[in-house]
Amino acid sequence: MTHVRPAIAVAVITTFAAIAIGSLMVISGEYPDSRTNPGTPIAIKSQPPATPSILLPSPTATSSKGEAHPIPSSNNPLAAAAHNAKVVFLTFDDGPDPYWTPKILQVLAKYGAKATFFQRGDMALTYPGVRDQVLAAGHTIGNHSVSHRQLTVLPAEKRRREISDGPKSRCFRPPFGATNRKVRSEIRAAGMTQILWDVDPQDWKRPGAAAIADNILHFTHRGSVVLLHDGGGDRGQTVAALDRVLRTLKSQGYKFPAMNC
């Protein structure tokens, strides 16, 4: 009997150790390294997790939980460039802005890049000439609602107006990336496809042009949708970062098509 108790203690300790290790494995399994899976949101230490998944340029879109949702190719705004795997989709939110949007257009033209501008309805009505410049340069326009309200907290009628009365487009990006089943359903009912993103350098925080560019270059992969802003404040850092990003990625053989919006 003098030798039984130590044996029991060892068994108990071993059991608890196994449970602890197993728990750690489960926890780590719920938070995979997003860089190993292009379909998952990108998150870095300097920012909160990016919003849920984008519509990828393929027959399916992958959600943040790894669920596949078929996208008919005829309705996929990214399908036109899907044959070329080495592409990056540049997107700009919150414009058009009479000062910053033209500067971004100049940088895009410098590198022969196209982009998609998710515009607010109130801004497009205020600056129709800037909107026309975007289209004349061969870029496309997405609907970013009428006044940039968070759709998930609005009453149904106001939510529908924010979606339907924004800029005419086949693409819709909900403000703040805030979406749910009702929002997605009303976007579809309005004849549009929801477009989010998978690379967010949070340029709106103005962390510095170098930080914005480094973030994009580190996390961008083939088929990435990059979120940037041409409205909503001082976008000088965004303009400077865009020049470096385009110069670097173009030297690596990337193309920059506009979405088919």
Image (cartoon, helix red, strand yellow):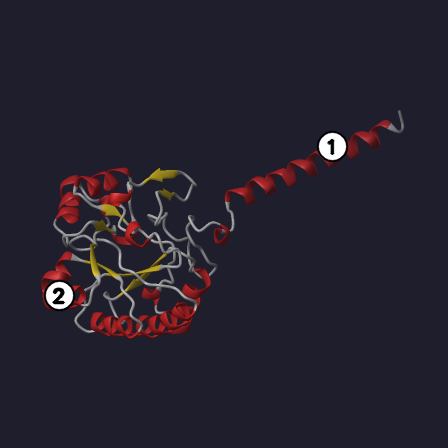
Q: Identify residue type, mark 1.
A: Val
Q: Can residue 10 be seen in this view?
A: yes
Q: Name the residue under label 1.
A: 12
Q: Can residue 208 be seen in this view?
A: no
Q: Where is residue 146 in the image (x, y as percent from the top left)?
A: 15, 54
- Residue at image location 85% in from the left, 27% down from the top: 4
The dot on residue 256 is: none
Q: How many angstroms separate mark 2 from mark 1 (CA)?
A: 73 Å
- Residue at image location 16% in from the left, 49% down from the top: 162
Q: Which residue lies furthest to the front in this view?
A: 83
Q: Identify residue type, mark 2.
A: Asp
Neighbourhood count class around disc 1 (C-alpha, 10 Å): few under 14, some 14–19, many 20 upward: few
Q: Position of residue 49 (x, y in %)?
A: 42, 53
Q: In this view, does 101 lie above or below 122?
A: below
Of residues 98 and 232, the one nearer the viewer is 98
Foreground disc of the pair 2, 1: 2
Instruction: Give residue 101's quadrant in the image.
Output: bottom left
Q: In this view, does 110 lie above or below 151?
A: below
Apparent side of residue 144 relative to residue 217 in the rendered image (left or right)? left
